[in-house]
Image (tube, rainbow, N blue to C red):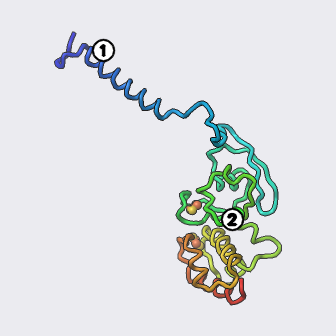
C-alpha cells in the first residue's frame, strides 16, 4: 500500500532505492579517495602505531623510556607517562605558553608537538631550574613575588632562562619580547618586570 507520496509503507520504493544507492556510490567514491595507501611509498616516512610505540628521550639530563601511542603529545607524554609535571596544560592549543619546554635548546609549546617527534632529543622543563641549587630565574621570581596561582610560571621561567642563555646581555625590553608567547591570566606582569630587571642587571 502506498502513502500519499506514492511510496510503499514498510518497504523500499524504486525511487528510494535509486536515491539510496546513488548516495552509497557517492560515499564509496569519497572514502576510496581518502583511504590511506596501503603499500609503502619509496622514501616515505615509516608508519607508527596505532598501538604504543617506544619513546626514548633525555629529560632534564636523564635518559627515559616509555611507550606511547603516536597521537600522544610531548606535553602528555611528560606529564602522564613520565611524571614530569612542571609543564602545565592550560589551553592545550598553542596559545598560552604554560607548557613551554626546550627541545634541543629551542623553546617549544609541548602541547603542539607529538612525543614521537621528540624521540632521542634533549628536553628541559622547569624542574631543571629547581632542585638543590635554585636557578637565578626562579630565584628572581621568588624575590619579586612574581606569581599568583603559578600555573603560567613554569612556562615563563623556561622561556626566560632560554632567552638569557641565548643573549646574557639582553635588555629588559629584549627579554620581554622573547616572552611574548607566554600569557599570565593573573596579570602578574609588573612583578615579572621587576624580576627581569633584576636578572638583566646581574647579566642573567
Ligand atoms: S598549554 Fe600549550 S600553549 Fe597553552
Ligand atoms: S600567576 Fe596565575 S596565570 Fe600567571
Give x and y (percent) for residue 139.
72, 80
Extreme residue toward the front, this view: 42
Q: Residue at x 60, y 71 (%)?
A: 149
- Looking at mark 1, is its residue's CB closer than 8 Å to ligand 1? no
Q: Residue at x 64, y 48 (%)?
A: 72
Task: Please tell me which residue lies in front, 123 or 83.
Answer: 123
- Residue to which mark 2 is pinned: 102
Q: Is residue 24 left or right of residue 78?
A: left
Viewer-nearest of labels 2 and 1?
A: 2
* For marks 2 and 1 on the same chain, the one whose residue lies earlier in the sequence: 1
Extreme residue toward the left, this view: 4
Bin the neighbour count of mark 2 within 10 Å (Cα to Cα): few under 14, some 14-19, many 20 and up: many
Q: Residue at x 61, y 62 (%)?
A: 109
Circle 2 SS class:
strand
Task: Please tell me which residue lies in front, 184 or 182.
Answer: 182
Circle 1 SS class:
loop
Bin the neighbour count of mark 1 within 10 Å (Cα to Cα): few under 14, some 14-19, many 20 and up: few
Distance in Å between CA atoms under marks 2 and 1: 62 Å
Q: Residue at x 72, y 52 (%)?
A: 119
The quarter of the picture where residue 142 lies is bottom right
Extreme residue toward the bottom, this view: 201
Give x and y (percent) for residue 140.
69, 82
Task: Please tell me which residue lies in front, 143 or 6.
Answer: 6
The disc at residue 24 is none
The quarter of the picture where residue 42 lies is top right
- Residue to which mark 1 is pinned: 12
Q: Quadrant of the C terminus?
A: bottom right
Give x and y (percent) for residue 193.
59, 84
**Vertical placement of residue 10 versus 30, above or below:** above
Q: Is residue 173 left or right of residue 101?
A: left
Give x and y (percent) for residue 154.
66, 69
Amino acid at each position: 500500500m502506498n502513502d500519499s507520496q506514492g511510496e510503499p509503507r514498510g518497504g523500499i520504493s524504486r525511487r528510494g532505492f535509486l536515491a539510496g544507492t546513488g548516495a552509497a556510490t557517492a560515499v564509496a567514491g569519497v572514502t576510496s579517495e581518502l583511504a590511506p595507501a596501503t603499500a609503502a611509498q619509496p622514501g616515505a616516512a615509516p608508519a607508527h602505531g596505532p598501538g604504543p610505540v617506544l619513546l626514548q628521550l633525555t629529560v632534564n639530563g636523564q635518559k627515559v623510556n616509555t611507550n606511547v601511542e603516536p597521537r600522544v603529545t610531548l606535553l602528555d607524554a611528560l606529564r602522564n607517562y613520565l611524571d614530569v609535571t612542571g609543564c602545565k596544560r592550560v589551553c592545550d592549543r598553542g596559545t598560552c605558553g604554560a607548557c613551554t619546554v626546550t627541545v634541543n635548546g629551542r623553546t617549544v609549546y609541548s602541547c603542539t608537538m607529538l612525543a614521537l617527534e621528540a624521540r632521542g632529543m634533549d628536553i628541559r622543563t622547569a624542574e631543571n631550574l629547581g632542585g638543590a641549587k635554585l636557578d637565578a630565574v626562579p630565584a628572581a621570581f621568588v624575590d619579586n613575588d612574581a606569581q599568583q596561582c603559578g600555573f603560567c610560571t613554569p612556562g615563563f621561567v623556561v622561556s626566560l632562562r632560554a632567552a638569557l642563555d641565548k643573549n646574557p646581555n639582553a635588555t629588559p625590553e629584549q627579554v620581554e619580547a622573547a616572552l611574548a608567547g607566554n600569557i599570565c591570566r593573573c596579570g602578574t606582569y609588573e612583578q615579572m618586570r621587576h624580576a627581569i630587571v633584576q636578572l638583566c642587571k646581574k647579566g642573567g
